[in-house]
Amino acid sequence: MSKCNRLVFYRKSVASTILLVVYVDGIVITGSDYVGISSLKSFLHTRFHRKDLGQLKYFLGVEVNRSKKRILLSQTKYILDLLVESRKLATKPCNTLMVPNVHLMKDDGDPFSDPERYKILVGKLN
């Protein structure tokens, strides 16, 4: 396996590619070489205690949906969870989140009733 950064490893040949992605305590293995992937999983199983969770469905806030022709990546669940947590699920969409060209002043408006909740939501968006 070649190292392309600290968390993503890959092996590429003329006919196929295998990617191994590590994040905290999770590993995602994907690629076009099914025999190579199976061999890599067997090798990892002999060296580490691990559990195979099967096909990837959700990773780092991204849902993975497969069909015969494509793979669709979506953050629908992540966004819905944010809307529920921020109590904004029933709000209606708008074209612009803010009125353009407004000059905001430090002392204008009402303070947040719960600044910690706001900080948590901003952290999740980052």
Image (cartoon, helix red, strand yellow):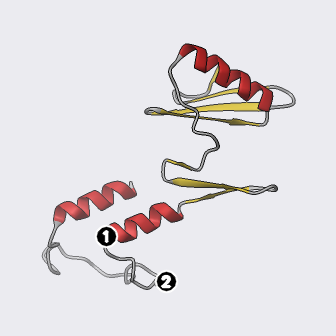
Q: In this view, does 17 lie to the left or right of 94?
A: right
Q: Which residue: 59% across, 20% down?
A: 45
Which quadrant of the figure has residue 116? bottom left
From the viewer's perspective, is 42 left or right of 95? right
Q: Residue drawn 57% across and 38% down? A: 53
- The residue under label 2 is 95
| Residue sticking out furthest to the right | 15
Q: Nearer the viewer, residue 15 or 84?
A: 84
- Whole-percent x, y for residue 77 in the image: 49, 63
Residue 95 x/y as whole percent: 49, 83
Res 39 → quadrant: top right
92 on left or right of 88 = right
Picture layout, residue 123 above or below residue 13: below
Q: With respect to residue 70, does 113 lie above or below?
A: below
> Which picture quadrant has residue 16?
top right
Residue type for callout 2: Asn
- Write the residue at 55% across / 28% down: 5
Crowding near pointer 1: few (<14 within 10 Å), some, many (20+)?
few
Question: Who is closer to the viewer here, 75 or 6?
Answer: 75
Decide: marks 2, 1 in contact (CB < 8 A)?
A: no
Q: Would residue 1 be visible to someone looking at this image? A: no
Q: What element carries label 1?
A: loop
The residues bearing labels 2 and 1 have C-alpha atoms spaced at a distance of: 20 Å
**Which image quarter is the N terminus in?**
top right
Q: In this view, does 46 lie to the left or right of 31?
A: left
The residue labelled by disc 1 is 86
Give the residue type at disc 1.
Answer: Ser
Count the labels in the image: 2
Residue 25 in the image: x percent, y percent?
A: 44, 32
